[in-house]
């Protein structure tokens, strides 16, 4: 039931750029330190690590942390995802193949079906599962005793996790967006792995456009590398970064075309908001989940968007940024803000 990994260049590079241990992992210092302590304590007691839930927007390192935990514990990791486990029977095969101390990593754990989720409860608490065979008067319950394992769950929508599921995790950590300084370190490490020479100012320019997300930083680094090799003799300078990312539609604060489309729609069609997510999605011809999961987290953290009881509303900074893009004065939009 492990997910198939497609053989494309981006995913191969993503795997190669993943840190293998905590001493290679950049950022999330509070989470890393707490996990170091928990891992050392578990190893001294010769016990399995408690179940771990990692929450946060995509691309912040939840999968990397799961693999690092397995590495630090000296354990085998089995990876799957919530949508991939369609039936309780699928989960039985995975759980019964786990050895003592193994790590089971479930990505997008909030997308587990209710039946599978409830089936997982006794496995997490008592390391046993009850499987019912046949129906009616012939129904029989078979109890499977499992070896002690650690479940590591990752979710981009922690609010969709049920309270019973969340309460069964001994450790719950939320990964935050990265600072530009942390992203510079990520880019310098990635550039070294990819045998690239990146000027410090160029790394800073990429970091400031990476939406606080290492995955995006590494993706932009590869696009800048392509541009530099073709049009700048391989030299990566701040000017090359600006030209390369402008060609990719990424502006000075890291917004792409969909981000700008969201802001433009709210400003021009809804006078700056508030507007409900369903109405906004309909106007954009996008799925509401795309806006909530992909666009909103960074716009909120960057101070460009805010949520109110009546819906989404852009901030003064969003008006200013939009006006700068259009070479218009902020006063043209100030009246709509009120």
Image: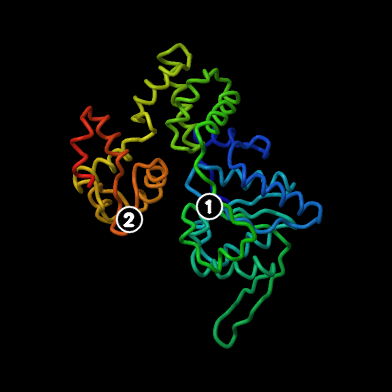
Residue 210: give x, y in percent of width and height: 45, 33
Residue 204 rendering spot, x and y as whole percentages: 49, 25
- The dot on residue 43 is none
**Number of residues whose C-alpha sits closer than 10 Å to that of mark 2, classed few (under 14), some (14–19) or many (20 or more):** few
Tally of marks: 2
Label 2 secondary element: strand
CA gap, disc 2 to disc 1? Answer: 23 Å
Q: Would you identify the image quadrant in which residue 324 lies? A: top left
Q: Position of residue 65 (x, y in %)?
A: 61, 45
Residue 3's spot in the image, x, y percent?
54, 49
Q: Residue at x 58, y 79 (%)?
A: 134
First reached walking from the N terminus: tag 2 or tag 1: 1
- Using residue 306 as the reference point, say whether residue 140 is left or right of it: right
Q: Is residue 202 visible?
A: yes
Task: Choose top left, top right, bottom left or bottom right for residue 53.
Answer: bottom right
Q: Give the label, 2 or 1, closer to the camera.
A: 2
Q: Which residue is mark 2?
A: 308
Q: Are marks 2 and 1 in contact (CB under 8 Å)?
A: no
Q: Please tell me the numbered disc located at residue 55.
A: 1
Report the coloring of the rendering: rainbow
Query: Is residue 1 at all visible to an observer of this figure?
Result: no
Residue 54 placement, left or right of 74: left
Q: Residue at x 66, y 68 (%)?
A: 125
């Amino acid at each position: 039931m492990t997910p198939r990994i497609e053989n494309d260049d981006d995913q191969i590079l993503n795997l190669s750029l993943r840190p293998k241990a905590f001493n290679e992992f950049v950022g999330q210092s509070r989470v890393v330190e707490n996990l170091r302590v928990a891992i050392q304590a578990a190893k001294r007691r010769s016990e399995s690590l408690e179940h771990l839930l990692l929450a946060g927007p995509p691309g912040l390192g939840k999968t990397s942390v799961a693999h690092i935990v397995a590495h630090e514990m000296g354990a085998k990791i089995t990876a799957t995802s919530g949508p991939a486990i369609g039936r309780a029977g699928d989960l039985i095969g995975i759980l019964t193949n786990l050895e003592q101390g193994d790590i089971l990593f479930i990505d997008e754990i909030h997308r587990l079906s209710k039946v599978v989720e409830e089936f997982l409860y006794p496995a997490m608490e008592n390391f046993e599962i009850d499987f019912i065979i046949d129906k009616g008067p012939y129904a029989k319950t078979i109890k499977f005793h499992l070896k002690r394992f650690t479940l590591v769950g990752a979710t981009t929508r922690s609010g969709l996790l049920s309270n019973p599921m969340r309460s069964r995790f001994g450790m719950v950590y939320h990964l935050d967006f990265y600072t530009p300084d942390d992203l510079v370190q990520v880019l310098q490490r990635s550039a070294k792995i990819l045998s690239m020479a990146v000027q410090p100012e160029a790394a800073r320019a990429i970091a400031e456009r990476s939406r606080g997300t290492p995955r995006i930083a590494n993706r932009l680094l590869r696009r800048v590398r392509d541009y530099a090799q073709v049009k700048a003799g391989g030299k990566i300078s701040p000017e090359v970064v600006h030209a390369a990312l402008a060609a990719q539609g990424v502006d000075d604060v890291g917004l792409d075309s969909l981000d700008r489309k969201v802001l433009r729609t709210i400003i021009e069609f809804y006078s700056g908001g508030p507007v409900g997510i369903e109405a906004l999605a309909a106007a954009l011809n996008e799925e509401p989940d795309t806006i909530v999961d992909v666009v909103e987290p960074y716009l909120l953290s960057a101070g460009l968007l805010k949520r109110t009881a009546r819906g989404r509303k852009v901030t003064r900074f969003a008006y200013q940024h939009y006006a700068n893009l259009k070479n218009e004065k902020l006063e043209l939009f100030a009246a709509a803000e009120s």
